[in-house]
Image (spheres, rainbow, N blue to C red):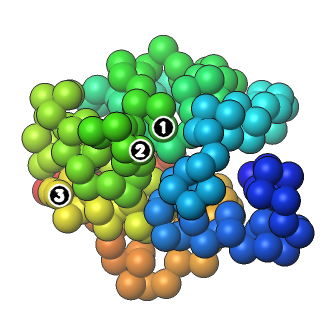
Amino acid sequence: MTDYVERHLEVDRGEADRLRALYWHRYGATLLGLVRHHAVDATHFLRETHDFDVAALVRAERGLTRLFARLPGRKVLLTNAPMAYASEVLRALAVHRHFRSRYTIESMRLHGTFRPKPSRMMLRAMLARERVPASQAVLVEDSAANLKAARALGFRTVLMTGHGARGGCGRMTRRRVARAGLVIRSLHQLPQGLERLRR
């Protein structure tokens, strides 16, 4: 993304990185800042910034296919990534068959405006489309901002910390961790954790 900003806004590397981070923190997605402030074409940005061999970069815990088969409830993907990229990731993880619905950045438009996570409007619209009350929905995330928005709407929330994602949870303060109903380091902790969340 930094490469894209550097090339298309014709700024130096430091400024490109600053803008990428600024827009991600301010809007929840770098894309939104680029569209709003620089009239960048969203489709072009998504295609260019996600044009690489996804499968070669995916690292997964063992046994995810069995784990997803055992998890109760309907699985819904909710990601600020584009559909093609998200689908490749799910296939690389061999869990693609377990997701009934997929909400990606392309489908996160309300009244013609992008509303990705952590937009509460988008979360409400997704719940309405899925016909699920927030109290029965569980959001598993690596972003404290996304969890905060979901929790405010009544979702049960799970913070995933064990994958070492930069830009997701990064260094989590106690206050940020407290925004989650459950904190896990491995997806294999999820079945037991869901039992605790239900109580």
Count of labels shown?
3
Q: Are marks 2 and 1 in contact (CB under 8 Å)?
A: yes
Query: Which of pointers 2 and 3 lies earlier in the amino acid sequence?
Result: 2
Judging from the image, what secondary structure is the residue with disc 1 in? helix
Q: Which residue is mark 3?
A: 153
Q: Position of residue 52 (x, y in %)?
A: 82, 32
Above or below for 79 versus 102: below
Relative depth, front residue between 39 and 31: 39
**Amino acid tagged 3:** Leu
Q: At label 2, which amino acid type do we have?
A: Phe
- The label shown at residue 105 is 1
How packed is label 2: few (under 14 Cα within 10 Å), some, or many (20 or more)? some
Q: Residue at x 41, y 75 (%)?
A: 177
Residue 133 lies, with reference to residue 164, above or below; the image says above
Of helix, strand and loop, which one carries label 2? strand
Q: Which residue is mark 2?
A: 114
Q: Nearer the viewer, mark 3 or mark 1?
A: 1
Q: Marks 2 and 3: which is nearer the front?
A: 2
Tell me the amino acid under the disc marked 1: Ile
Residue 120, compared with residue 166, is above or below; it is above
Asked whether residue 89 is in view, the answer is: no
189 lies above or below 78: below
Give the percent coordinates (x, y) of residue 21: 65, 69
